[in-house]
Amino acid sequence: MKLDRSVIGIELGSTRIKAVMIDEFHTPVAQGEYLWENRLIDGIWTYGYEEIEVGLQSCFSSLKKDFEDKTGEKLRRVGAIGISAMMHGYIPTDKDFRPLREFRTWRNTITAEAAEKATKLFDFNIPQRWSIAHLYQEYLKGEEYLKDLCHVETLSSFVHRLLTGENVIGIDDASGMFPIDIHTKDFDAAMAELFFHETGFDIFSLFPKVLVAGKNAGFLTTTGARILDREGDLEAGIPMAPPEGDAGTGMVATNSIRVETGNVSAGTSDFAMVVTDKKLSVHREIDIVTTPSGSNVAMVHCNNCTTDINAWVGLFGQFARLIGKEVDKSTLYGLLYSEALKGKRDADSLLSCNYYSGEGVTDFNSGMPIFLHPAAKELNLPDFMRSHLMSALVTLKIGLDILKKEEVPIRKMFAHGGYFKVPKVGQTLMSAAINAPVSVMETAGEGGPYGMALLSSYMISGEELSLEDYLDQKVFREVKTETVMAEDEDVKGFEEYTSLYQKLLKVERLALEVFNA
């Protein structure tokens, strides 16, 4: 293995910080992870700044040990490193990059007023979780700290700056901060001018510098090397790729960055992305972001996906322990997910609303999970699990149905994320939701950090290829893919479930009102 051609991708996801090291053949050779979870503090979904650094160190230490156990060598240097993280959100800092407020994640739905005003101002959909919506909301509230505000960052650009000293961001993550002009590959100047006249904030000086895939984004500093590697073995000077969002790395990991390709990522949140050259009408449910190379992407992003499923699986695990039958997590998920395919195609009218937090697509600012079933229906495990697994995707389907009306074709989707780990189950239900084939690559289990590693590899490749051609010709040419197309009855059942789910949302609104949640 050539260490100068090996690269590391690190992604700070919602439930895990994960690192993947790949060799010159793009094959994973070592992994590491750190488990963490967002917390709701004073109405804000957040992670502590100190945990960001602790998590990075623990994750890298785990990867380093895996590499050294496998090779017997010290991990001192690689060809490149790349950082990715949850897109969107808000980290405001002063002139010395000291945080002025807590890190606000994509999960927050506290900027409705600003999102609506910005959407009208730009004639362009601005979701609540975007950085510009958070900044505008703080301006509308007249927050005192804004007088000291000099920078706004996302999690990926924040971590990248800690490691390199460079205040830059990849174009995909940037497109979750502020609208992008795909011709200049930068923030939209006309919209930035409108925002300046409205608020006095200059986007181009406030936000990080935008970089497309393949550009050098700086080098690991001595301080950065010590942040990653507490043992002090990792050398400074390693090239760093532009920091990206998890949406962009998911597109790369599934080779879904050409026009009319699409991918879906499903974990704590879920989102589907279709690369398009078609100009769309403004829809509150549809974001327009970009690929890491700067092409337009129609994106449906949902805040809630597997959190409620995980809670129920955990409950079954507690029961197993209670009767003295300890079951490892992977086996438990496999057993319960597989039961879902034995259930009735519409889950026999058993209904689950999985909203732990607010949901922009259906216009909820907060959430409360609900399970409801008609008294005349049998409560059994297959229908119960199918209901929860469909609930995780149904809001995504609502958004994607709007794309269909806009005549954006969804011919085939590539899938990755924890929802698809159990073979065929998640694929079948996703295919039923969109009435199109869903494919999973053999590398898809690596997910975002693998995509970030590929972006790092592309940066140092020296190839005169576009990112699209690089992925097609150098990475995915011989990768095995498994494709599932749902049966007509599955598609019909999901449509029936969706129709009932729309009625369940009225119950969800009433529950939130009654319990003042």
Image: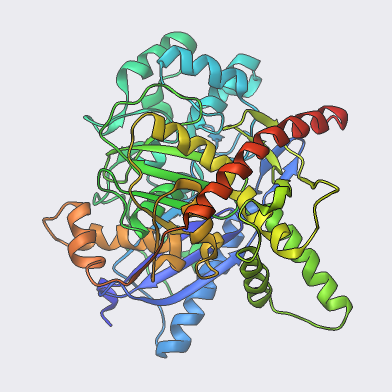
Q: Position of residue 258 (x, y in %)?
A: 25, 47
Check the image and report above or below for 228 versus 392. Answer: below
Q: Is residue 104 visible?
A: no
Look at the image and tell me in which quarter the C terminus lies: top right
Toward which corner of the image does residue 439 lie, by quadrant? bottom left
Q: Position of residue 496 (x, y in %)?
A: 60, 43
Q: Position of residue 489 (x, y in %)?
A: 53, 54
Toward which corner of the image does residue 479 lie, by quadrant? bottom left
Name the residue at 68% across, 41% down.
45
Q: Position of residue 303 (x, y in %)?
A: 60, 42
Check the image and report above or below for 514 versus 77. Answer: above
Check the image and report above or below for 170 versus 65. Answer: above
Name the residue at 61% across, 22% down.
112
Pick whichever, 117 or 12, lies toward us. 117
Check the image and report above or below for 137 versus 130. Answer: above
Look at the image and tell me in which quarter the N terminus lies: bottom left
Q: Is residue 311 visible?
A: yes
Lateral position of residue 86 relative to residue 259, left or right: right
| Residue that protrudes farthest toward the bottom in the picture | 72
Name the residue at 84% across, 49% down.
376
Lateral position of residue 8 relative to residue 149, left or right: left
